[in-house]
Image (spheres, rainbow, N blue to C red):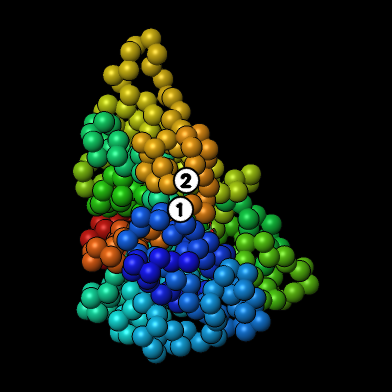
Amino acid sequence: MVEMNKKQVNVGMVGYKFMGKAHSNAYSRVNMFFPNAPAAPVMKLICGRDREGVEQAAKQFGWEGFVTDWRELLSGDDIDLVDINAPSNAHKEIAMAAARAGKHIFCEKPLALNLADSREMLEAAEEAGIKHMVGFNYRFAPAVQLAKKIISEGRLGTLYHFRAWFLQDWILDPEFPLVWRLQKDVAGSGSHGDLGAHLIDLAHYLVGDMSEVVGMSETFIKDRPMPTSMTGLSAKGSADAPRGKVDVDDATLFLARFANGALGSFEASRFAAGHRCTNSFEINGSKGSIKFDFERLNELEVYFTDDAADVQGFRRVLATDPAHAYMDAWWPPGHTIGYEHTFVHEMLEMMQAIHEDRQPEPNFTDGVKCQQVLEAVELSVSERRWVKVNEL
Ligand code: SOE
C-alpha cells in the first residue's frame, strides 16, 4: 500500500511479455525498497491485445485491471504515466497519443523504428511538457554507476578507448522462427537496435558524443520458418512451416570516433555461441582502466596506474556496499543483486523526476541520440564509408 502523503503516480502499461514482466516487478518493488522516494507508482491498468493473456498477466503481476486497447489508457484522468513496452513498431503511435493526452511516458528501447520517428516523438513530448524516459536499464547497475563516478571524478584521466560487445546466441539455430525481433517493420533492425543500442547508450553516458562511425553488418541466416505467433526469445521452430526472409542484421560491428578524441569499437551479435547475454565494456584512460560484464553485474574491474608498483593489476570491486549507488536500499554488503534490480532503479528515477519536476535520465533526447548513431552506422554499412553522426 502506498502511503497517503506520498505522491501517487498511476501507471497504465502497454505490453505484458518479457519487458512487461520486468517493469511490473519494478513498479511493485520500488516503493517497498525505496520508501523515501517522493512518489510511488500505482499499478492501475495493463494493456494487451489478447484478452486472455493480458487478464492472466494482470493477475500474475498485480495490476488492478486490464484493457485490450491502449487508447483506453488515455481517455480519462486516472492514468498519469504510460509505460510502452510493446514491440518497437507500436512505440511511436502510442507515445504521440500519450503526449497529446498529457501523460508522462516511459518507453522501451530502441525509442522508435528510425531516427525521423524518434525525433517526432521527442518533439511531441517536449511540446506537451510531459516527463519522458527511455529504457536503457544497464545504466542503473550499481557497478555501471560506479564506472560513471570514477570517470566523472577524473580517476581514469583522459579517455582513450571504449571497447564494447553485446553477444547473444538465441537465434544460432537456423530453424529458430522468424519472431518479431527478426522483422524489420516491427523491430527496426536486428542485433544493432536491440543490443547495439544499449552499448551506444552506455558509450554516450560514460564517454560522450560520437562524431563519426564506420560499420559492417551481416545476416547469416537469410530465411527462417514463420512463427505460429509473435513469440519471444524461447520460441520453437518447425521445419515444415513456410519460410520467410530475414530482413534485419544478425550481427553489426562498428568503429567510432568520440568528440573528445577517444576511439570506440562496438560489436553486437546474436550468433556468438555460448554467449547468452554478454554485455561488456572496457574503458582505458591515461590513469587506468575499468571493465564491466553484465553476466557478473555486481562487479567492476578496476586498474589504476598510481597503485603501488608491486601490486599493480586489475582488481575486482564488488559494487554492493552502501558506498555504491542504490545498495543501501537492498541487502547488507556482499549480498548481490540482479537484472531485475536495474529496472527498479529506472522506475525510481522516473518517480523522482516526476516529483522534482525535471526530466528523468535517460530521456527521449538520449533515445534520439542513440537512434542517430544507429542510423549513421546503417548508412555507413550501405554506402561502405565513414559517416559523420551529424550528417543525419
Ligand atoms: C533480447 O535480445 C534482449 O532482451 C534485449 O531486447 C534487451 O534489451 C537486452 O537487455 C537483453 O536482450
| Farthest top residue in view | 310
271 or 230: which is nearer to us? Answer: 230
- 50 sits to left or right of 144: right
For the point 27% across and 51% down, which residue is it?
A: 210
Beta carbon at label 2 within 8 Å of ligand 1: no
Instruction: Please report contact status of discs 2 and 1: CB closer than 8 Å, yes or no.
Output: yes
- From the image, which quarter does the C terminus lie in? bottom left
Residue linked to disc 1: 33
Residue 98 at x, y percent in the picture? 36, 81
| Farthest front residue in view | 4
Q: Tell me the amino acid under the disc marked 1.
A: Phe
Q: Secondary structure at mark 1?
A: helix
Q: Secondary structure at mark 2?
A: loop
Q: Does the rendering let one see residue 377?
A: no
Depicted 58 relative to depicted 162: above or below: below
Residue linked to disc 2: 330
Question: Along the polypeptide, which appears first: circle 2 or circle 1?
Answer: 1
Residue 265 at x, y percent in the picture? 38, 44
